[in-house]
Image (cartoon, grey):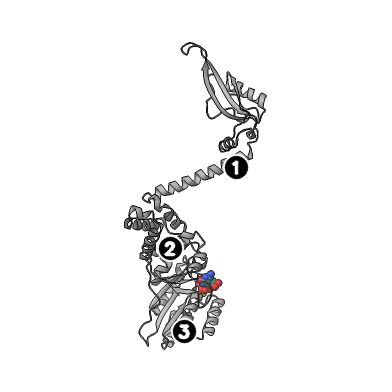
């Protein structure tokens, strides 16, 4: 190793020697200031000592790495080293010229800073929102949060797991998973499938929700299942006359399944259409997508449901949206008498936790989940155990939710 030590009266003096002997790219490894001579500290002379090396490559690998993680210092860029302040008597002169820092050192430094920042963020999050999360459950907590479970809901789940397990059980992954599955199931309120009213009386079901979430597709899936699998008489009504294509879409499904379809444009027409379908077991009403921000259209929808009070009104929401958008939709559509929620597009969800978050925050009940575009297959009754497994599966495997869906199917 080619370490060299230079001493001078001032830092500038010592650095000047380093530069003269080792060149402008020399790397400073350490500096120290001490006094020499004098009696009992009187008349002692300050000495500045700089240890340097000509090139980073001259250092042994271990030392090179630790140097690389520090800010680069060379004989020229900064004559003010970190380890020793310049002697008080004389200020350090300005650096002669700036030399480029080695890229390798900079990259290593950026890497270590990134790591530091991410640790800090994690720690801050933990101390702010998860003060009570024990170390053994911390990964579970962060997994839930990154799976779109709101922090407050994740915290409740962790509390419940912790309350029921002993310290030893908390370190047993199977115990934690089992208890977490139970806690999840308890926090997933479901309404079960559509309940048909008395025989001879049609059950009126309405689907409402924002545009493009899958209302019409879900109406078709429900109609096909009632008609083809349960052998029920089904009637379809659409009040979505805003777009020709929307009517055509439902008409095509109605023709394939071979069920009647009525198109209505006013609350009075809706009442009459329902009257004409009195021999059906179930009447499914499809509605136009209303922007949750469009209060007028939502009021208009309410006037339809005042003319015909549906037995059940299902709010259709896409699980590809974030919790805040979904919560806003839930609040807006409460005004039309929504009593159940259908989550669509689980096959495209970022995380299944968003379903749990919304059901918890909105105190709503889940009716169905849809998992793809195929009519009639990609629909299932929302079942707490299945949803809990989906949340846990994507938590454990750290796979995309769609992969968990395929594994759990
Ligand atoms: N991936 C996926 N796409 C779906 C699902 N349900 C509906 N879609 C698609 O979402 C789009 C909008 O559906 P549509 O029923 O017209 O939505 P609406 O505007 O709410 O009636 C269509 O392309 C559907 O095929 C689902 O569960 N998964
Ligand atoms: Mg539609």
Give whichever of discs 1 and 2 has the lower sequence position: 1
Q: Any atom of ligand 1 within 8 Å of the CB at mark 3?
A: no
In front here: 52 or 277? 52
Secondary structure of the residue carrying numbered label 1: helix
**Above or below: residue 293 compared with residue 27:** below
Q: Residue at x 42, y 83 (%)?
A: 282
Secondary structure of the residue carrying numbered label 2: helix
| Mark 1 to mark 2 CA distance (whole Å) | 43 Å
Q: Nearer the viewer, mark 2 or mark 3?
A: 3
Residue 227 is marked as 3
- How packed mark 3 is, by other alpha carbons closer than 10 Å (few <14, some 14-19, many 20 or more), is some
Secondary structure of the residue carrying numbered label 3: helix
Determine which residue is flagged by label 1: 107
> Do labels 1 and 2 touch, CB within 8 Å?
no
Residue 92 is marked as none
- How packed mark 1 is, by other alpha carbons closer than 10 Å (few <14, some 14-19, many 20 or more), is few
Q: What quarter of the picture does the N terminus occupy?
A: top right
Q: Is residue 219 left or right of residue 15?
A: left
Q: Residue at x 46, y 83 (%)?
A: 229
In front here: 247 or 97? 97
**Above or below: residue 169 compared with residue 40:** below
Give whichever of discs 3 and 1 has the lower sequence position: 1
Quadrant position of residue 47:
top right
Residue 368 lies, in percent from the top left, at 44, 72
| Mark 3 to mark 1 CA distance (whole Å) | 64 Å
Q: Nearer the viewer, mark 3 or mark 1?
A: 1
């Amino acid at each position: 190793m080619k370490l060299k030590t230079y001493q001078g009266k001032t830092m500038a003096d010592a650095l000047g020697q380093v530069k003269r002997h080792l060149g402008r790219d020399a790397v400073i490894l350490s500096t120290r200031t001490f006094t020499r001579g004098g009696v009992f500290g009187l008349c002692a002379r300050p000495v500045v000592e700089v240890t340097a090396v000509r090139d980073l490559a001259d250092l042994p690998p271990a030392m090179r790495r630790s140097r690389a993680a520090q800010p680069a210092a060379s004989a020229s860029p900064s004559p003010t080293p970190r380890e020793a302040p310049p002697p008080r008597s004389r200020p350090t002169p300005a650096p002669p010229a700036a030399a480029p820092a080695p890229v390798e050192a900079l990259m290593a430094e950026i890497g270590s800073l990134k790591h530091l920042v991410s640790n800090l963020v994690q720690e801050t999050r933990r101390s702010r929102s998860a003060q009570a999360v024990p170390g053994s459950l911390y990964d579970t907590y962060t997994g839930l949060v990154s799976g779109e479970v709101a922090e407050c809901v994740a915290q409740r789940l962790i509390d419940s797991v912790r309350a029921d397990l002993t310290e030893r059980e908390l370190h047993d992954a199977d115990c934690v998973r089992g208890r977490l599955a139970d806690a999840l199931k308890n926090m997933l309120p479901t309404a079960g499938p559509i309940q048909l009213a008395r025989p001879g009386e049609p059950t009126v079901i309405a689907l409402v929700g924002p545009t493009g979430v899958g209302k019409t597709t879900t109406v078709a899936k429900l109609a096909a299942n009632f008609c083809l699998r349960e052998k029920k008489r089904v009637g379809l009504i659409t009040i979505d006359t805003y777009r020709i294509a929307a009517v055509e879409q439902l008409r095509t499904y109605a023709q394939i399944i071979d069920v009647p379809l009525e198109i209505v444009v006013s609350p009075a027409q809706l009442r009459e259409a329902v009257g004409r379908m009195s021999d059906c077991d179930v009447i499914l009403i499809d509605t136009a997508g209303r922007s949750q921000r469009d209060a007028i259209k939502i009021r208009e929808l309410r006037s339809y449901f005042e003319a015909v009070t549906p037995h059940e009104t299902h709010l259709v929401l896409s699980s590809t949206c974030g919790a805040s958008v979904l919560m806003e939709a839930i609040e807006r559509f409460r005004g039309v008498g929504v009593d159940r929620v259908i989550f669509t597009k689980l096959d495209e969800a970022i995380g299944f936790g968003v379903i749990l978050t919304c059901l918890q925050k909105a105190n709503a009940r889940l009716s169905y989940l849809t998992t793809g575009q195929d009519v009639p297959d990609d629909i299932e009754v929302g079942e707490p155990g299945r949803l809990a497994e989906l949340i846990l599966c994507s938590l454990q495997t750290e796979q995309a939710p769609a992969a968990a869906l395929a594994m759990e199917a």
